[in-house]
Amino acid sequence: MIKRRTISTVTPDSAVAIAERPAGADAKGTINLRIEAQTRQLIDDAAAALGKTRTEFMIDSARKAAVDVLLDQRLFVLDPQRYDAFVAALDNPPAPGPKLRALLRRVPSWDA
């Protein structure tokens, strides 16, 4: 069974929690990459500058990028006043105007 990592969104006053795999989950896989020699050398130089192996550097970099992408998609950080305004806007959407009504009456081009 595959265990997934999850990112949980929380209130603005608390920290972001990232669920890790249970301690007993030792399953590891491999990722094979074909890259240009210059790119590999650049990665090796950056890893060496940080005192890491190429693998450690690539895993850390990919993990950070993945978390950033997921947080950009799922996390809103707002102060309490803006959060209340955001929730109020979601709970009380404006009434449809004439342009929206006209759009909803149109027959989609794939149905014509």
Image (cartoon, helix red, strand yellow):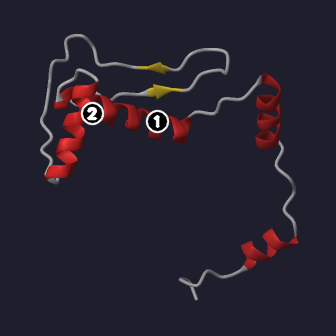
Q: Position of residue 26 (x, y in %)?
A: 15, 18
**In terms of depth relative to the viewer, which is nearer, 91 or 18?**
18
State the residue at coordinates (18%, 43%).
41
Q: Which amino acid does label 1 sit on?
A: Asp
Q: Which residue lies furthest to the top in this view?
A: 23
* Drawn side of residue 9 relative to residue 31, left or right: right
Residue at x 13% of width, y 32% of height: 29
Please state the horizontal and vertical placement of residue 3, each as a whole percent of the image: 27, 27
Residue 80, picture quadrant: top right
Q: Distance between the residues labelled 2 and 1?
A: 20 Å
Q: Residue at x 21, y 27 (%)?
A: 48
Which residue does the image show at 86% across and 53% down from the upper left?
94
Return the residue at label 2.
Answer: 46
How crowded pointer 2 is (Cα within 10 Å; few <14, some 14-19, many 20+) is rated as some
**Quadrant position of residue 4:** top left
Badge 1 is on which residue? 68
Q: Regarding mark 2 in the picture, which secondary structure is present there?
A: helix
57 or 99: nearer the eye? 57
